[in-house]
Structure formats: structure tokens, C-alpha cells
Image (cartoon, rainbow, N blue to C red):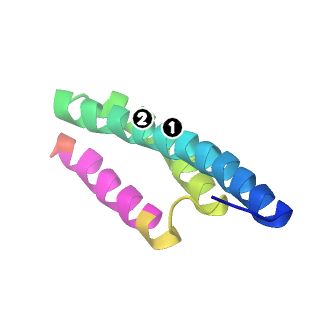
Amino acid sequence: MANTPQSKKRARQNEARFNVNKARRSRIRTFLRKVEEAIASGDQDAAKGALREAQPELMRGVTKGVVHKNTASRKISRLSARVKAISA
């Protein structure tokens, strides 16, 4: 356990940051799951709409440091390719 006042404060800050990041990650996963479900249902309009909502959420995760930029770009790219493939 932390002993000095500085290390106690750091422990509090880390826990608060952990909770915020956890909520952000959870929110991103929820949006991604909605896209996955729309793709699975085969409804291209719903999938496009869900993807349009998920993109800013993922990129916000990048700016907040929860997700790496390349990871977010890769997920968006792969999802958009799958959404596009529904019509084919």
C-alpha cells in the first residue's frame, strides 16, 4: 500500500483514471457490438447507420488514449469492408 502522501494521491488518481477509461472502453465496445449485430442481421442500412455512429466513438477513444490510432483505423476499415460486402 502507498505510504507517502504523493503515492497515496497517485493511487487515487490511477483508480479514478482507470474507472473513466473502463467506461470509455465499454462504450466503444457497445457501439462496435451494434455494428456487428447489424452486419449479422444482413440489414445494410442499419449496419451503415451503426458504423456511422461507431466511428466518432472509436476516434474519441484514440484522442483520450484508450485505443491506439492504428487499432481504431483497422477496426473501422474492416467493419466498413464488411458492411459494404453485405450488398454484394
Q: Position of residue 33 (x, y in %)?
A: 33, 36
In the image, 49 versus 75, the foreground residue is 75
Q: Position of residue 43 (x, y in %)?
A: 25, 28
Residue at 36%, 58% (x, y): give it. Answer: 75
Q: Residue furthest bottom?
A: 70
Which residue, given by chain and number where applicable, does mark 2 sit on? Answer: 30
Could you say which quadrant of the image residue 44 lies in?
top left
Compared to 4, does 53 lie above or below?
above
Question: Looking at numbered disc 2 in the image, what kind of residue is underneath it?
Answer: Thr
Characterize the magenta stretch by its predominant secondary structure: helix
* Number of other residues with Cα within 10 Å of mark 2, as a class: few under 14, some 14 to 19, many 20 or more: few
Say which element carries label 2.
helix
Give residue 27's mark.
Answer: 1
Compared to 11, does 43 lie above or below?
above
C-beta proximity under 8 Å, tags 1 and 2: yes
Give residue 66's mark.
Answer: none
Say which element carries label 1.
helix
Q: Is residue 83 left or right of residue 9?
A: left
Could you say which quadrant of the image residue 46 lies in?
top left
Q: Which residues are magenta?
A: 72-85
Is 76 one of the magenta-colored residues?
yes
In the image, 47 versus 34, the foreground residue is 34
Q: Is residue 78 left or right of residue 11?
A: left
Residue at 20%, 49% (x, y): give it. Answer: 85
In the image, 17 versus 61, the foreground residue is 17
Q: Position of residue 17 (x, y in %)?
A: 67, 51
Question: Looking at numbered disc 1 in the image, what kind of residue is underneath it?
Answer: Arg
